[in-house]
Amino acid sequence: MKTSLFDYKLPKELIAQFPARKRDQSRLLVLDRTDTGKPVFLPFKNVTDYIQPGDALVVNTTKVFKARLIGHRATGGEIEIFLVRQAQVPLKQRRAAIKSSEKTQFPARTLKDACVWVGLLRPARRVKEGERILFGDDSVLLVKRLGGAAWLVEFSSKTVEKRLVAKYGHVPLPHYLRRDDQPSDIRRYQTVYADPNKIGAVAAPTAGFHFTQPILSQLKARGVKVIETCLHVGPGTFKPVTADSIADHTVDPEFAELTPDAASMLNQVRDNGGKVFAVGTTTVRTLESAKITDGKVVPFSGEVDLYIRPGFEFRVVDHLITNFHLPKSSLLILVSAFAGRERILDAYRAAIEERFRFYSYGDAM
């Protein structure tokens, strides 16, 4: 299929720059795939009317961290390091890379305590291997260029890493939020169920923004199983589909986990005839990446790079709760695979007519 088939025109003023005043005050478009009628427009809190006792609400509990670090070169120029994921680099390889620099002396005894990240640098054209990026009295080492803006970035210790992220880090807001991050973003660019033990996302699973603890408690009290999964969302979630054909696009790998307990609860719901509601495209990718053996969803932990496009056979997810996605994006392609391209684009046009708010801080469907 041509990528151009997944395009639509969105007035810029409908790109939400800030979240709704309260999470559950956002709006909800309900699209029934078995009904030829028009979409239904409701307050988001009415989502509970569609989830029945015995169903499962599956959420992504990854926690966003302040992944954008703003530092300086020794020459004074500003450098942004966008931390993507931790990297496992053999000590011997790191030491060799550092020794290849004639300008840097990095004591070998500290290498064992160091931690390495893959980071995207901006600007990246003039920086060199072995160079230090300065953050006050601290610094990080540029170990190796991986290609383009990607580098191996080394912190001298985990303690230094935590200190720099806390002091110099910024909430990694997406590019279409045309503003700097604010203190309120630390709380609102995060779900209420984000697990502090599962820090690792550099972009939020935004479909979960609308849920509040009272909504979750109401669902649980009605007999709905709230099941936790984890997928650490990477910057690739914003990568546009630039190929003429959607088949020529690739999805960047991300770490995902479906624990044995979560898989067991999920299988129990399925065995009892309950429906599976996935909160967000990241949850869909996690669940649909799992193996199914003898009709049972199998737990797993590891990187996933599942690219869902029209023709994909959904084996686990029955219903999807999601935000409105960018034109010609892999996320719009995923929801089109789930509900049909023409129906999704018709629903998007209806949402635009109703002045729904779009993208990360926008409304839901």
Image (tube, rainbow, N blue to C red):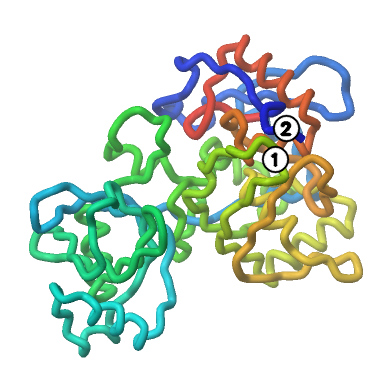
Please report contact status of discs 1 and 2: CB closer than 8 Å, yes or no.
yes
Residue corresponding to mark 1:
246
Residue 108 location (% of width, % of height): 21, 88
Residue visible at 35% across and 86% down? 91
In the rendered structure, the answer to whether residue 101 lies left or right of residue 263 reads left
Using a 10 Å C-alpha cutoff, classify the residue at mark 2 as few (fewer than 14 neighbours), some (14 to 19) or many (20 or more). Answer: few
Q: Residue 69, relative to residue 16: is it above or below?
A: below
SS class, disc 2: loop
The quadrant in which residue 119 appears is bottom left
The quadrant in which residue 327 appears is top right
Residue visible at 58% across and 38% down? 242
Q: Which label number is shown at residue 132?
A: none
- Name the residue nearer the viewer: 96 or 276: 96
Residue corresponding to mark 2:
2
The Cα–Cα distance between marks 1 and 2, rounded to whole angstroms, is 6 Å
Q: Residue 343, relative to residue 339: is it above or below?
A: above
Residue 92 location (% of width, % of height): 35, 88
In the rendered structure, the answer to whether residue 288 lies left or right of residue 315 reads left
